[in-house]
Amino acid sequence: TKGTTLFLLTGPVNARGKEDKDSTMTIIGMGIMVLYLLFDGFTSTWQERLFKDVQVSTWNQMLYVGLLSTIVTGLGSASTPVPGFDPKLYSYLFALSASAAVAQIFILQTIKEFGALLFAAVMTTRQFLSILLSCIIFMHPLTMGQWAGTSMVFGALYYKTFAGGKKKAKSSPPKEEPVEAGKEMTEQVS
């Protein structure tokens, strides 16, 4: 949170062409970012708990998340008219939906197999690469404060991921070597 705050407060975060400093929009944007971070951190941790404690399958989680998303979207857009049939629009919507579904499978499998912490490291790496590519491709320079904030966020996450992995490896009991048939008898006799 400190790193994100440092990033937001030490340099411009507006899109190109939106250079006006509207403090209301900045506050709303920061609020949305805080909500995103809260829900994002909660979601993967909760999904990991469902896998371990309740043993809900990947497919059931996808089904229920999809149904709830459909209900929320339907309630939120009840007053918005549905666009008429446009093959190009609906082909884009289908492609977007299909890619989101495939991504959800990978997300849930990663959380199920490796846990929420590693998933957070993977997603943070993706976000970091997106920031880097945006800076390079669209020539969005970052201030030193923004680089410091970015380094704080990624450094803390990677430290937590790798330190957590080492603790887990130390705390797991050593694996016993399989005993070959007859070897146990010869060791006892000698």
Image: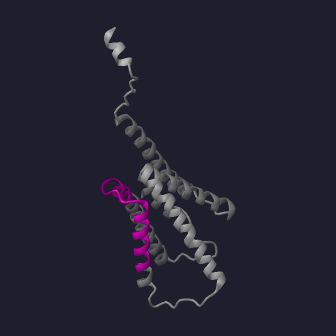
Which residue is at the front of the view, 166 or 146?
Answer: 166
Q: Residue at x 47, y 55 (%)?
A: 109
- Horizontally, residue 83 falls left or right of residue 170, namely right
Q: Is residue 37 above or below residue 89?
A: above
Residue in view at x 38 percent, y 19 percent: 182
Is 134 on the left or on the right of 63, as rendered? Answer: right
In the picture provided, is 14 more to the left or to the right than 110? right
Q: Is residue 19 visible to us here?
A: no
Residue 95 position within the rendered picture, expressed as x and y whole percent measured from the top left: 60, 72
x and y percent of residue 37 in the render?
Answer: 42, 63
Res. 38 visible in picture: yes
Q: Quadrant of the N terminus?
A: bottom left
Location of residue 169 in the rendering, given as x and y in whole percent from the top left corner: 40, 37
Residue 56 in percent (x, y) is at 36, 60
Placement of 87 over or under 188, stated as above or below: below
In the image, residue 108 lies in the stretch drawn in magenta: no
Residue drawn at x 42%, y 41% as measured from the top left: 165
Q: Nearer the viewer, residue 176 or 26?
A: 176
Q: Residue furthest front?
A: 182
Q: What's the residue at 53%, 68% (across, down)?
A: 100
Q: Name the image quarter holding residue 17.
A: bottom right
Task: Report the span colored magenta.
Answer: 45-71
Q: How is the image coloured?
A: one colour
The rendered magenta stretch, by its main secondary structure, is classed as: helix
Give the total of numbered labels: 0
Quick one: quadrant of the C terminus?
Answer: top left
Which residue reaches farthest top?
A: 190
